Image: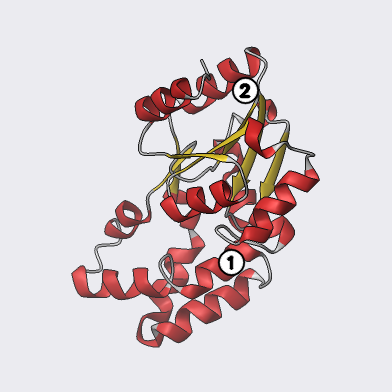
């Protein structure tokens, strides 16, 4: 029986849309692609999530990958909280699950800097029994250690948990840890998949 639901945040409980954000700068296709590759899609973003480098070091890393666009990258980073927007269903969904007695947790790759800039866009946080953001433990999904850390930190019973994430590799890693997994592709499908596991 499932009694614990674990949520990813980005593209599950909030929208993370760096593509639309970058389009606002009207850099043109080639420059936009290069900046995306150096920032949101590049290796330093994962280090940002890991919480082991200060924001200024992260920006330096971004710029090292596309030095010809240093000023543009700095501008993009300065307002990157605008990549995050609330999703209309998130708070009421989480609240209803809480009211039904489920234990609720977050497991998310998220940097401390971005969390501070966007936490007001997460009205579902007060309903959580616990959160594990990657920057707090210096581990990131889909590394097996982060799932073990979550299980131990909150004394979870893996086969009574279900984890929803928009990235298939992250779901598969949770399943390797004995947690039921749902590859989240949208709210309605997520609810349907939970129902199949007996979560109403």
Colour setup of the view: secondary structure
User: Residue at 48% of width from left, 57% of height from top?
Assistant: 79
Residue 29 coordinates in the image, percent (x, y): 20, 69
Q: Is residue 176 above or below residue 43?
A: above
User: Residue at 54% of width from left, 67% of height from top?
Assistant: 46
Mark 1 surroundings: few (<14), some (14-19) or many (≥20) residues within 10 A? many
Q: For this rendering, which residue is in front, 140 or 42?
A: 140
Q: CA distance from mark 1 to mark 2?
A: 36 Å
Closer to viewer: mark 1 or mark 2:
2
Side of 169 where 161 appears, left or right = right
User: Residue at 36% of width from left, 34% of height from top?
Assistant: 186
SS class of the residue under badge 1?
Answer: helix
Residue 128 coordinates in the image, percent (x, y): 68, 30
Q: For this rendering, which residue is in front, 38 or 24?
A: 38
For marks 1 and 2, the one nearer the N-term is: 2
**The image quarter in which residue 100 lies:** top right
**The image quarter in which residue 142 lies:** bottom right
Q: Which residue is mark 2?
A: 1
Q: For this rendering, which residue is in front, 39 or 139?
A: 139
Mark 2 surroundings: few (<14), some (14-19) or many (≥20) residues within 10 A? few
Q: Is residue 69 above or below residue 55?
A: below
Q: Which mark is residue 141?
A: none
**The image quarter in which residue 1 lies:** top right
Q: Which residue is mark 1?
A: 48
Q: For this rendering, which residue is in front, 198 or 73?
A: 198
């Amino acid at each position: 029986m499932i009694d614990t639901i674990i949520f990813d945040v980005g593209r599950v409980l909030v929208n993370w849309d760096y593509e639309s954000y970058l389009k606002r700068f009207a850099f043109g296709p080639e420059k936009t692609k290069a900046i995306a590759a150096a920032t949101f899609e590049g290796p330093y973003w994962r280090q940002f999530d890991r919480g082991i480098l200060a924001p200024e070091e992260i920006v330096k890393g971004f710029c090292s990958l596309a030095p010809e666009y240093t000023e543009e990258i700095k501008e993009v980073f300065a307002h990157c909280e605008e990549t995050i927007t609330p999703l209309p269903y998130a708070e009421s969904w989480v609240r209803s699950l809480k009211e039904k007695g489920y234990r609720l947790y977050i497991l998310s790759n998220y940097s401390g800097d971005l969390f501070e800039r966007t936490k007001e866009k997460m009205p579902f946080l007060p309903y959580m029994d616990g959160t594990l953001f990657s920057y707090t433990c210096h581990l990131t999904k889909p590394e097996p250690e982060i799932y073990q850390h979550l299980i131990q930190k909150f004394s979870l019973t893996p086969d009574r948990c279900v984890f929803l994430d928009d990235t298939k590799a992250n779901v598969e890693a949770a399943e390797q840890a004995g947690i039921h997994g749902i590859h989240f592709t949208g709210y309605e499908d997520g609810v349907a998949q939970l129902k199949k596991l007996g979560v109403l």
